[in-house]
Amino acid sequence: MSPYSSSLTDAEWAVVEILLNELLPKKKQTCPQKWGYRLLFDAMLYQLKNSCNWAELPKDFPPYSTVY
């Protein structure tokens, strides 16, 4: 988990995860995901809160092109 103030708590993530599972289309997975949805979501929240450029995301997040 990212230690940022914009990161979701476990309780917040539990709610978001339920909503994502309902909203995201079910697709056949041919290979495992490289990045988890929680890490991607935390990276998006970090960018929104700090108004940084996508390329300036901290290195412990996935590549900015993936998050974007």
Image (spheres, rainbow, N blue to C red):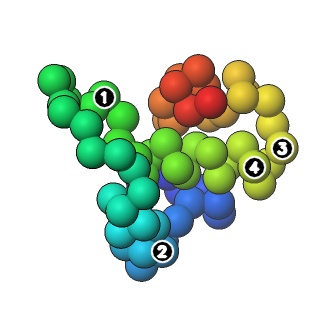
| Amino acid type assigned to the residue bearing label 2 in the image | Glu
Q: Secondary structure at mark 1?
A: loop
For the C terminus, the image quarter is top right
Is 16 displayed left or right of 25 in the figure?
right
Q: Earlier in the sequence, mark 3 or mark 1?
A: 1
Report which residue position mark 4 lands on. Answer: 48
Determine whether 61 is above or below 10 in the image.
above
| Marks 4 and 3 close (CB-CB < 8 Å) | yes
| Amino acid type assigned to the residue bearing label 1 in the image | Lys
Q: Secondary structure at mark 2?
A: helix
Rendered image: mark on residue 34: 1
Determine whether 64 is above or below 7 in the image.
above
Residue that appears at 60% across and 25% down: 64
| Amino acid type assigned to the residue bearing label 4 in the image | Leu
Q: How packed is label 1: few (under 14 Cα within 10 Å), some, or many (20 or more)?
A: few
Residue that appears at 36% across and 69% down: 18
Q: How packed is label 4: few (under 14 Cα within 10 Å), some, or many (20 or more)?
A: few
> How many angstroms separate mark 1 from mark 4 (CA)?
23 Å
Report which residue position mark 3 lands on. Answer: 51
